[in-house]
Amino acid sequence: TSSLNTMTRMSAGRRSCTGFRTRQLSLGPLQQRRESKPFRYRPLSHGRCRTTTVSADSRWRFGRVWHGLVLGLLVAVLSSCVYFNTFYNAEKYFRDAENKRTKYERELGNRSVNQRARRTYEGLYEKAVRKASLVLDKHRESDLVDDAMFLIGRALYWKRDYQYASRSLQDLEDNFPNSEFLDQARYWRALCLDELSQPEEARALFRSLMSDRRPIVGALSGLRLGEMSDRDEDW
């Protein structure tokens, strides 16, 4: 009887152990909580990688700003190209006029050729003046204004329009005291003053250029003073 009771207890123990291993854990409440609160991504902050959404309105505003910057840059580039091209054409006319004038001076013996050549180079100087004047009228803030004034002054001198040539050169001296053309402009203005029957003013300007010890302009001024002395017999 005791052996039978012992076997009965062992069998019951095996059944209870087997029942424990086959028992399933109920996950119903936890699963319901997970399903009721779906996962949502929250972007990180404080320097970490984060995802942002760009709205259509932001893209439109950015496009407008970018378009404005590109358009402004394009306008600035085209404007600079226009005035530079205008002055380039003025210089081209001036160089052509200089070549024609040099040829005219070499052919002083042939009167008919001289007159025709003179009309030709004076017309080229006139074109140079008109082109350079566009720089002064439409591009007053450009860095070629003093260049244009100096070109106009010389071109008008060779057209024998000494009054306006002197005025253009004087404007350069007054408005651009640090211009690289300052000394040359003063020399050409002295030439204009001499042609305008103002020899004393011209001499004073030539002497000031010599006293400033300008290597090239000073030498030219001294040479011109000597020519004026020979002409006026002022020794």
Image (spheres, rainbow, N blue to C red):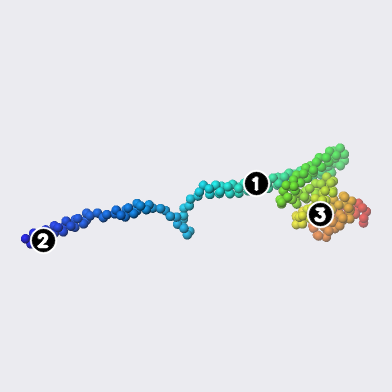
Identify the residue under disc 1: 75
**The residue under label 1 is which amino acid type?**
Val
Identify the residue under disc 2: 6
Q: Are marks 3 and 1 in contact (CB under 8 Å)?
A: no
Q: Please count the marks in the image.
A: 3
Classify mark 3: residues with Cα within 10 Å, few (<14), some (14-19) or many (20+).
Answer: many
Asked if residue 30 shows in the view, the reply is yes
Q: Quadrant of residue 223?
A: bottom right
**The residue under label 2 is which amino acid type?**
Thr
Which is nearer the N-term, disc 2 or disc 1? 2
Q: CA distance from mark 3 to mark 2?
A: 136 Å
Which quarter of the rendering shows the N terminus? Answer: bottom left
Q: Residue furthest left?
A: 1
Mark 3 vs mark 1, foreground winner is 1
Q: Residue furthest top?
A: 112
Is residue 225 shown above or below 110?
A: below
Identify the residue under disc 3: 186
Residue at 81% x, 46% y is 156
Q: Nearer the viewer, residue 177 or 36?
A: 36
Classify mark 1: residues with Cα within 10 Å, few (<14), some (14-19) or many (20+).
Answer: few
Residue at 22% x, 55% y is 23
Identify the secondary structure beneath mark 3.
helix
Q: Nearer the viewer, residue 33 or 61?
A: 33
Residue 92: percent from left, percent from top? 75, 44
Q: Quadrant of residue 218?
A: bottom right
Q: CA distance from mark 3 to mark 1?
A: 37 Å
Residue at 40% x, 53% y is 40
Q: Nearer the viewer, residue 152 or 120?
A: 152
Identify the secondary structure beneath mark 2.
helix
Q: Nearer the viewer, residue 189 or 211?
A: 189
Q: CA distance from mark 2 to mark 1?
A: 107 Å
